[in-house]
Image (spheres, rainbow, N blue to C red):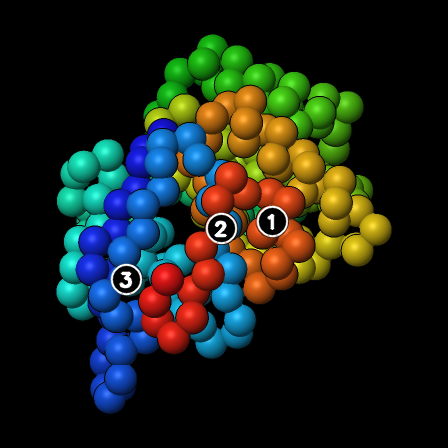
Amino acid sequence: MAGVDLQQIGFTYPGATEATLSNLNLRVADGEAHALLGASGAGKTTLLNLLSGILHPTSGRLLFDGDDVSQLSGRARNVAQVFQFPVLYESLSVAENLAFPLHNSGVARKIIDERVAYICDELELGQLIAQKPRSLSLFQKQLVAVGKALVRPDISLVLLDEPLTAVEPRIKWQLRQTLRRVQADLQVTMIYVTHDQTEALTFADRVSILTAGGI
């Protein structure tokens, strides 16, 4: 995992007359559960895309463990992301979905099997490993999506982009508590992006509020 340091980050979209983010400073410690809270239009998605490498800052520096990654691709940064709606391969089983990122990285079969078993144990997915996504509830699908983000041992940062938006209200608490437990167990650096203050306050060690392009 990595500590994340944003130093005077600014970003202006091409053709825009005003900056979306301006002189933004934020430090997220290695292994921290951090929530980024803000209303619609506050710049959450832009900041998330800067962290993931989809966008690059117009000014300032983005550091992972002291190394400047501002202009690196997301792949080079080893960042994983969980989206509002689970992104799974419908033709693959739960175990195969979890193993997919490791296969892509050329990891040995023995290590893949060990890592998948470990993540299944952490997320209590053991009884689902042979099932296909179509037979899973939305809650279970999102757990598998979280597992895909965590399965690579070289991941520096996990970004959670409003991961409970599509989940039924009655099980949001359950999923949030599962995420928090796994984060604490694995000491994963996580940034949880949301507009919901209850989600932010019940998940994070610290909460940053994003407004008017700054913290």
Q: Position of residue 188 (x, y in %)?
A: 46, 31
Up the image or down, 12 lies above or below 127; here it is: below
The quarter in which the C terminus is drawn is bottom left
State the image quarter where residue 108 is shown.
top left
Q: Is residue 104 visible?
A: no
Please name the residue shown 34% across and 67% down the image: 214
The disc at residue 201 is 1
Q: Relative to the observer, which residue lies in front, 61 or 100?
A: 61
Q: What distance separates the C-alpha of mark 1 from that of mark 3?
A: 22 Å
Q: Indicate the amino acid at tag 3.
A: Leu
Kindly state the secondary structure of the residue where label 1 is placed. helix
Q: Indicate the amino acid at tag 1.
A: Leu
Kindly state the secondary structure of the residue where label 2 is placed. strand
The disc at residue 207 is 2
Please name the residue shown 32% across and 33% down the image: 2
Say if mark 2 contacts mark 1, CB within 8 Å.
yes
Residue 187 horizontal side relative to residue 212, left or right:
right
Up the image or down, 20 lies above or below 30; here it is: below
State the image quarter where residue 32 is shown.
top left
Q: What distance separates the C-alpha of mark 3 from that of mark 2?
A: 15 Å
Residue 2 horizontal side relative to residue 152, left or right:
left
Residue tagged 3: 24
Please name the residue shown 68% across and 37% down the image: 177
The quarter in which the N terminus is drawn is top left
Q: Indicate the amino acid at tag 2.
A: Val
Up the image or down, 177 lies above or below 163; here it is: above
Q: Position of residue 139 (x, y in %)?
A: 74, 45
